[in-house]
Amino acid sequence: MTFEFKKLDLDTLPSDVGMPPYDRKALKPRIAHIGFGAFARAHVAMHLHETLAAAGGDWGMRVVELFGTSDLFDKLAENDYLYTLVETADEGTNTRLLGAVCETQHIARDGVEVLINGLAEEQLKIISLTVTEKGYCVKNGQLDIDNGWIKEDLASPSTPKTAIGLIVAGLAKRRALGNGPVTVMSCDNLPNNGVLCGIAVREFAAKVDAELAAWIEENVSFPSTMVDRIVPALTDESRDLIRESLGGQIDLNGIVCEPFRQWVIEDNFKAGRPKWELAGAQIVPDVEPFEEMKLRTLNGSHSFLAYLGFLAGKETIADCAADPVFFAEARKLMVDEQLPTLDVPDDVDLEAYADSLLKRYSNSKLKHRTWQIASDGTQKMPQRWLNSVKYHIAHGSDYRHLVLGIGGWMNYIQANRNGESYEVTDPMKDQLAEIVASHKTDRTVYVNTLLALESVFPSELVGNDEFNQAVHKAYAAVADKGAAQAVADLAS
């Protein structure tokens, strides 16, 4: 379905559509956000919007893109940088126009030099980014110098194509101009995101200019953050919801999400920050306990439901939650196998947190596709499942839900659901496809070949006989009985 774009007519919007209550003319691009996808619009920019609504000020956001065309940015500019956020649940919807964005830059439209100069501007105090796990180009805790994009950027650092290369080029220009310290803040869903972002930036800079690397060490901070909000990819149904919420008008930059949101931010800023706590953000000295809680419980159970639910014919997380068996086993995964591995502040009620997640999963208005969540499994499994498996092996405790998830993934990457083919999205998809084509007829060789992927499965697990046998058994259970029966068998 396609929609014809027309500029929003603010005067004819329904009366229940919220408008920015602050002076948008006062905004300056003091934050540059790289990667203005659905999550950035529904979470990072939304928190800034609510901060401005509470306290006013001039903390505006410039949004920056390195890929695709500038069409959506051009439409955003035509609407005076306003866009629609629809929060939806079974209880109802809440629609607002968000106004924290005040400028756009797109490499295809403006050229890379404009983007570099933008990061060097004196009034800019924060560079934030949502570029997904693979956008950091980190492998085994270090900058992946074998990455093709990184190789190109290192060969030509003045014309970067990656977010890391762009940030380093911007910091080099900032240093040359004497424009002072700045904070680089990752808002992506990966553990120790600030640490990893800092590693990538520092190691890239060291290969370009040792003096620049030393300046970055003194003048740039990399706070970690934990982000949580379910923001499904747009569908025709969600686009219709946006249009209906706007009284029939169309906003191509609009986004639909759940009402819940959480943002935990490490208090580590070199040049000031907005008062995000006014919008509900938690500013803490250490983010790690919160991010581990979210990654293992929410993201870990999401992946469990994504692989096994998709293979069982369930198209959305809400479909999984509506099935009493999947609902119960997802809760057991969280409470019995993930929560014991966590070390969180004493005032956090972990079982209540798990129950709140299941309530969110049951939101039938939110069409969060299992296929979407199943992407990039080789990058997601280590932090979502495998660290917990290590804990259970060390403590002699049960991890059958976790290992069935691994078995589900090994079946999922074969791209065959009862004769129906589908695309497997993963940074290692070519290598995975080769393994499937070469070995899937011999189960033992197939599973062992996947377990030999060193960037996914740590050697301490692969060398453990108990784990190996459990994975082989889980793979066979899904392959022979089907995902639905394999999940049902967990209850026995």
Image (spheres, helix red, strand yellow):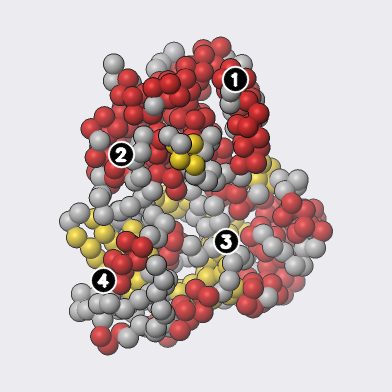
Q: Could you tell me how far apart the alpha carbons at marks 2 and 3 are, in whole angstroms?
A: 40 Å
Which residue was labeled with disc 1?
Answer: 442
- Graded by Cα atoms within 10 Å as few (under 14), some (14 to 19) or many (20 or more), the crowding at tag 4 reads many
Q: Position of residue 383 (x, y in %)?
A: 51, 36
Q: Quadrant of residue 477?
A: top left
Which residue was labeled with disc 4?
Answer: 245
Residues at badges 1 and 3 in contact (C-beta under 8 Å)? Answer: no
Q: On the rendered structure, is 419 left or right of 195?
A: left
Q: In the rendered image, is residue 60 in sight?
A: no
Looking at the rendered structure, the kind of residue marked 3 is: Thr
**Marks 4 and 1, the one that precedes in the sequence:** 4
Q: Could you tell me how far apart the alpha carbons at marks 2 and 1 are, in whole angstroms?
A: 31 Å
Q: Quadrant of residue 274?
A: bottom left
Which residue was labeled with disc 2?
Answer: 320
Residue ID at (58%, 26%): 440
Q: Nearer the viewer, mark 2 or mark 1?
A: 1
Say which of 178 and 359 sits in front: 359
